[in-house]
Image (cartoon, rainbow, N blue to C red):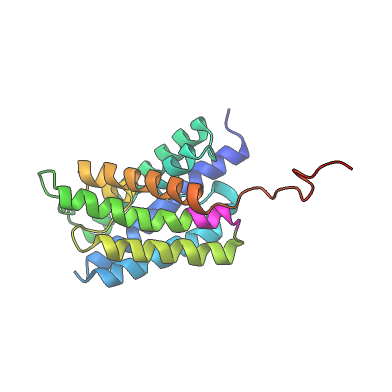
Amino acid sequence: MFGREKIAIIIGEFLGVAVLTSSILAMTGRTDFPFFSAIAAGLAMGLMTILLAPHSGGHINPAVTIGLWTLKKVETTVAVVMIAAQMLGGLAAWRLNEYFLNTKLSDTAGKTFNWRVFVAEAVGTFVFTWGVAAAVSRKYEAGMKAVVVGGSLLLGILVASFASNGILNPAVAAGVRSWSWAYATAPIVGSIVGMNLYTMVFEAAPAKSKNRGSRKK
């Protein structure tokens, strides 16, 4: 039922989100300054991109998967499998870190919908997925792709952290106990807008034939 390729996708996306979530929890448990969390997330994302991109795609984020799906770069069934694995990875990291800390993680999302949080998460994800779209469009090799994707996540988190927790990832939001409608939906909106806008404006058009439009002699 599941071939090696699908198993690699499931395990890769599960582990990728779990590692990313744990790296963010490790920083937020020690400092409230968003710069350090952004660095940890960017480094983790870059490393996971190098390790997992050839096997699972290295999305490590439901918003990224949905954004690429709207560009028809991911099949629907594969996208569903990836998102399920990503969400499970976030939840597993949550429970594992509670076990390590021997205490329950507190909810940091707030109980009411906040438009500032929504806009901040959407704009931050726009910045992040703009870089992802560039890396995919230009077909960067593993090292360059890791730098661009990891750096874009770092910048996106810093931008969003002015008004939100700077998560930019629904699966990670569940794992770090920052789950709400804003944190769940805003990254998806930002990803769809960011990726599609980059593709429409900057993606290289197919080269035109030199003889196109010329008259036959």
Work out which quarter of the rendered image holds the C terminus and state it: top right
Compared to residue 160, the image places residue 192 above or below, namely above
Compared to residue 148, the image places residue 205 above or below, namely above
Picture coordinates of residue 199, whole percent (x, y): 50, 48
Indicate the quadrant where residue 127 lies: bottom left
Picture coordinates of residue 21, whole percent (x, y): 34, 56
Q: Is residue 42 visible?
A: yes
Magenta segment, which residues? 133-139
Name the residue nearer the viewer: 61 or 215.
Answer: 215
* Residue appearing at x 22%, y 58% in the figure: 165
Q: Is residue 89 covered in magenta?
A: no
* Residue appearing at x 18%, y 59% in the figure: 163
Name the residue nearer the viewer: 73 or 91.
Answer: 73
Picture coordinates of residue 109, whole percent (x, y): 16, 50
Indicate the quadrant where residue 86 lies: top left
Q: Pick out the residue farthest to the left.
A: 112
Compared to residue 157, the image places residue 107 above or below, namely above
